[in-house]
Image (cartoon, rainbow, N blue to C red):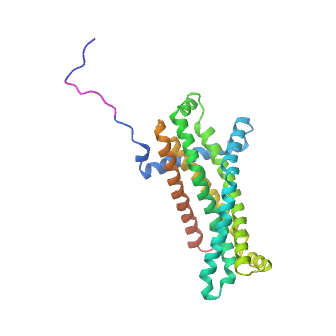
Amino acid sequence: MTAPDAASPPMTMAPAPEPEDRTYGARFISRGRLAARALYWLGWLSFSRRSVVTSGVEREVYGLGVGALRLVASASLLVGLIAMFQVAAQLAPYGAETISARVVAWFAARELGPVVVALLVVARSSAAIAGELASMNASGEIDALRAMGLDPVKYLVSPKLLAVIVVLPALTVLADALILTGVWLGSTAFLDYSTGRFIVQLRESFVTRDIAVGLGKALVFAVVIAIVASDEGLSAERRAAAIGPAATRAVVFSLIGVLAADTIVNAIFYFIPGLI
């Protein structure tokens, strides 16, 4: 055995970049690829009868949706009351506080309902999704799936994506109803509206198109939340210390993604004639 040449420098490998050091362009490309793969498997997942797959989706729906019911219900009721107070206070100097319920009902269907639900789901579930996948990555479970010839996106990401797509529109409908309940409580208790008058204004302002816009936003937000959180979890460093930062990044980028998607949808509807 010969000794290594003292003149030659020791061979070192360049350290891999930390996930948090990824550029925004790299994150965008990574999430686009992940979204394409997850949506590819979504059709198979929707019609699969395998018990292991269906039970996984049911577990995700329960964790992401049923577990968030109390949070969404209480927050939506309070948001309805707050919106009613604020709108009525702004319209009072013009003697137009009588149309407060009409204004809030329209805004609730298009904006308040889907955005409030999306932000609550981000706060509650994005960190959980990213933390779970980052933990599996750190413990080698995802490498084990690949070694067995199983696609982690198929069995880990797609069930979460399908669950969020199911849960978010359903929670949005619930939030719309409870926001309107808060508006009704505020208008009858503090503005001396009659229930009949409130219903009349609700019928004049609440149309099917408004509900469709809100549900469309909810679907877009669902894809953003699931893909961003999953990407941060899968790209985390393979060490336990990286789980927390991955969960934090998932919440931050999910919030930004939801607000950016909402801005784009609003720009499409409000700046293209005929779509509003």
Foreground pick, 137 / 34? 137
Q: Position of residue 134 (x, y in %)?
A: 52, 40
51 in magenta = no
**Residue 138 placed where, x, y %?**
50, 35
Residue placed furthest toward the top: 1
Give the dominant element type of the magenta stretch: helix, strand or loop. loop
Residue at horizontal 52 percent and vertical 61 percent from the top? 260
Task: Indicate the quadrant where residue 204 lies.
Answer: bottom right
Question: Please, is residue 48 above or below residue 115 in the view?
Answer: above
Q: Residue furthest front?
A: 189
Q: State the residue lying farthest toward the left.
A: 7
Residue 216 seen anywhere in this rendered image of the structure: yes
Query: Which quadrant holds the C terminus?
Result: bottom right
The residue that appears at 67% across and 48% down in the rendered structure is 163
Which x, y percent locates residue 252? 50, 54
Residue 33 place in picture, x, y as percent: 53, 46
Q: Residue at x 67, y 69 (%)?
A: 80
Q: Residue at x 44, y 51 (%)?
A: 25
Q: Quadrant of the N terminus?
A: top left
**Which residues fall within the magenta stretch?**
7-13
Displayed quadrant of residue 151: top right
Left or right placement of residue 232 versus residue 54 in this view = left
In the image, residue 117 sits, relative to residue 58, either above or below, namely below
Number of labelled discs?
0
